[in-house]
Amino acid sequence: MLRRSVILYLAWMACGAQAADALPSLKVDPSLVPPSQRPAKTGAAKPAAASKQPAATGGAAAPAETPAAASGVEVFPVATPGQPAAEAPVAVEAAPAPAPAAAPTSTPASVPAPALKAAPASVRQAAPAVSPAAPATTSNARNLPPLKVDRSLVKAPPGGRTVPPTAQAALDEAPPYRNVTTARNMPPLKVDRSLMGTPPVARRRVPAGQTGETVIAGTPAAQEADVTGALPPQVPEDDETRMLKGAITLSEYVERHPESRATLIAADQLDGTTDAVMRAEGAAELRRATTSLTADSIVYEPPTDELRAQGNVRLVRGEDVVEGPSLRYQLTRSEGVFDKPRYTVRRNLQTGENLRTTTGRGEADVMEFLGENRIRMENATYSTCGPENQDWYAQVDTLNLDFESEEGEGRNGKIIFKGVPVLYSPWLDFSLNNRRKSGFLTPTFGVTNRTGIDLLLPYYWNIAPNMDATIGLRVLGTRGLMFSSEFRYLQEDYAGKVRLDYLPSDRVADRDRYAFSLQHAHQFNQRLMGALNINSVSDRNYYTDLGARLAITSLSYLPREGSLTYSGDWWQLSAKATDYQTLANLPDIYRLLPSVTFNALRSDLPGGLVFSTLANYTDFRIDDVTRDQGRRAVVYPQLSLPMRNSYMFITPKVGVHLSNYDLDRGTANAAQSTSLSRSIPIFSLDAGTVFERDSDLFGQGFIQTFEPRMYYVLSTYKDQSKYPVFDSALAD
């Protein structure tokens, strides 16, 4: 309407006085004039007849027919030849009309115009000034500047919505025709409002009338102004973290806003409403801060935060990955049901002072999510092996994984190794973080000719992170019931293990039988440490009769030893006392009561020389009166010169072995000397070289080495037939 009015106005001015009679009267749509510019109603005036004057060539033209003043619009006459032009106003701003506008009537040109108010400075500067003396000829009309409309005077669209400047500019530049048929047949535009955020307007101000006051929209003072279709009510501030700006993927948005709880959806086709149901079809993707879901189709219900996914479903929760055909899930509570899933669950769990990553894999018929850290599965498999090397796995009817208590539990399960079932149990209980936990261990079963049936049922007791115990009952078919226990402890400066096996009233031996063992190591400070190793059995044949392993039954001597060691910067001094319990009717061996050893090594001597020495003093004791016993002192200083390069080494060394014996002869050697000494010089040469080459075997590259070595020792001959042998014997 505005564009058409301007065209008619310019055409009428171009025609001049000659075409005045042929032109229709200028019509102005009263709705284009804001209520504030409409003149006040002055009563029920009767319409006056419109006056016309015939057009005369070269004479003064009568003014065109105008609407009545009751319409609220003032028409300004245009100067014609022979008449002075009226003063051109800059803008019109009439007072608001409280009553509806009357029907348009004709008004003589002599009716005075209502009072005018000055327009804003920007508009006032743009309006051209018209000289009163300049006649408005046809040529002058053509040279007039184009009509400029103050957009603030244009009535706002209904509903209180304003047209953005960019949209209005597009409408102004559009052609005067529209393809109405095509526009009406187009499908409705559907927009996901959750991706748009809140409206980009936080506070709006509306005029309060002629007083110039400012009223905030949404307040009681603005409700009266909003009746005229002003502006929408106040809206909250925009949430920038929930608005997508420009081209951005869902993954990029989540990375930029990890704290955002917005739910993002993308797909080939989206439909629905954000306050009811959203449907995503074709390469559908749903993301939230810690959850990612892809599927062929996703149906999401924002009010309940629930979803259903079908076809090639892949759910990622943190480091957990689950794939399968269908899923029902509640995002807020992290609860749902997955049909026939293939899963990988990974957690970083604390084990003592170390943070360890545990990974479990498997399949199931049904997987139930019971929160962030609890999973329940039916007819499931579970393994911690890698996907390319799954040697063993557990297969259970029901499997519960609780990452809060860091424990797993299965019902009616079996352990399968290399495809072969090796253990069945109606109840399986295991740790998810490789941390020790209390529970029954795998039982052992066997049959021997000395014990008959041999069944051990051990129970593991996790007392503390640095302390545990194993308690078991051992059923011996022919001998009775044995109590077996082991206790371990660990502290910052000491650690140890205590073991006790006790068989009351052995039915075969007709006596109580036991085995006791203690190993303890203690670090008193950075230089001083001590150790205990005490072992004892009730009789010599204990391990022969009751031992369950070859390494136990083949024991010949049980050591009982205590030691102290002090370490210097380049030397070390140790003292120990050692006794042995003889088993299986073997002869006794010497006790060391005590044995003191001194070792020293200096490798920073001039010329690259290295000095080392070994000194020992030992008192050998034995209960056999037929054998020698006594004290021995040994000193063996050495000096060497190591020479080494990238492909060979040579180490010459010289030393002197000095020893002295103070003996108590046994009855078998009573005539021998009780004091002996010897001095033996020793020279040795150690040399070697290294050859390397790259090789290939079965497609695998490796380095092949060849290291020939020569060791030569030269010492003087010394007859030692009279010296006793204290610390060497035939092998078992």
Image (spheres, grey):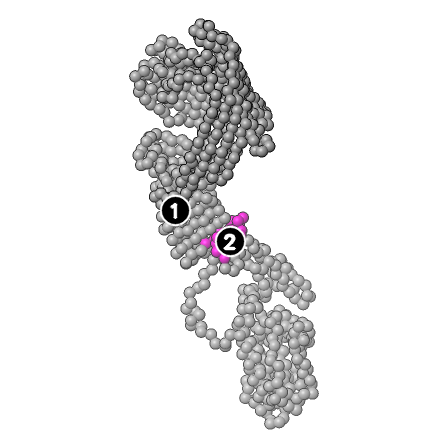
645 is within the stretch colored magenta = no
What amino acid is labelled 1 in the image? Glu
- Position of the N terminus, as image quadrant, is bottom right
Residue 193: x percent and y percent? Answer: 49, 57
Res 201 → quadrant: bottom right
- Near-viewer residue (729 or 105): 729
SS class, disc 2: helix
Q: Write down the residue under mark 2.
A: 253
Task: Give the CA separation, mark 2 to mark 1.
Answer: 24 Å
- Near-viewer residue (651 or 457): 651
Which region is colored magenta? 248-265
Q: Residue at x 48, y 19 (%)?
A: 533
Q: Residue at x 46, y 15 (%)?
A: 720
Above/below status of 628 relative to 279 = above
Task: Give the residue furthest to the bottom.
Answer: 57
Above/below status of 703 relative to 298 = above
Residue 47: x percent and y percent? Answer: 59, 80
Q: Write down the residue under mark 1.
A: 323
